[in-house]
Image (cartoon, rainbow, N blue to C red):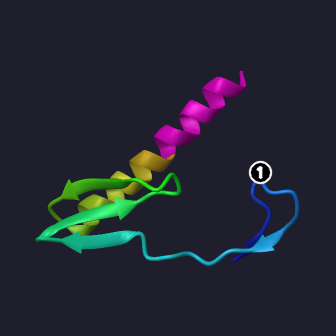
Amino acid sequence: MYGKREQDPVPSTYFRANRFSLINGAYYFSTRENTLEGPFSSRAEAERGSMEYVEKVAQQRRQTQH
């Protein structure tokens, strides 16, 4: 993935990592903020949780910008 994130001074290459982990039978996802979110009962549930997390963080950033 090639692009420039808002906080980056110049465009760079970024590689997506597998953000989902199965630990002791439960699913978790890791964040850019270096947190491990979960547990979730399935990978699909963890994926939904990660999308909700991204939306929540985006909404918080929009609120702080206004």
Q: Residue furthest right?
A: 10
Instruction: Tell me the SS state at disc 1.
Output: loop
Looking at this view, is 47 or 32 the one in front? Answer: 32
Task: Using the image, determine if residue 52 lies above or below residue 11.
Answer: above
Q: Nearer the viewer, residue 15 or 33?
A: 33
Is the stretch drawn in magenta largely helix, strand or loop? helix
Q: Position of residue 9 (x, y in %)?
A: 87, 57
x then y, percent, for residue 23: 19, 70
Q: Quadrant of residue 38?
A: bottom left
Q: How many marks?
A: 1
Quadrant of the rendered structure where residue 19 is? bottom left
Residue 40 image-quadrant placement: bottom left
Quadrant including the N terminus: bottom right
Q: Is residue 3 left or right of residue 44?
A: right
Q: Quadrant of the C terminus?
A: top right
Identify the residue at horizontal 64%, vertical 31% (top origin). Answer: 62
Kind of residue at disc 1: Glu
Residue at 50% from the left image edge and 76% from the top image edge: 17
> Residue at (80%, 72%) from the top-left corner?
12
- Residue at mark 1: 6
Q: Is residue 40 left or right of residue 47?
A: left
Residue found at x 49% / y 49%? 54
Crowding at dot 1, Cα within 10 Å, few <14 / some 14-19 / many 20+, comes out as few
Report the span colored magenta: 55-66
Left or right of residue 60, residue 41 in this image: left
Is residue 3 located in the magenta-colored stretch of the structure? no
Which residue extends farthest top? 66
- Seen as rendered, the residue at the extreme front is 34
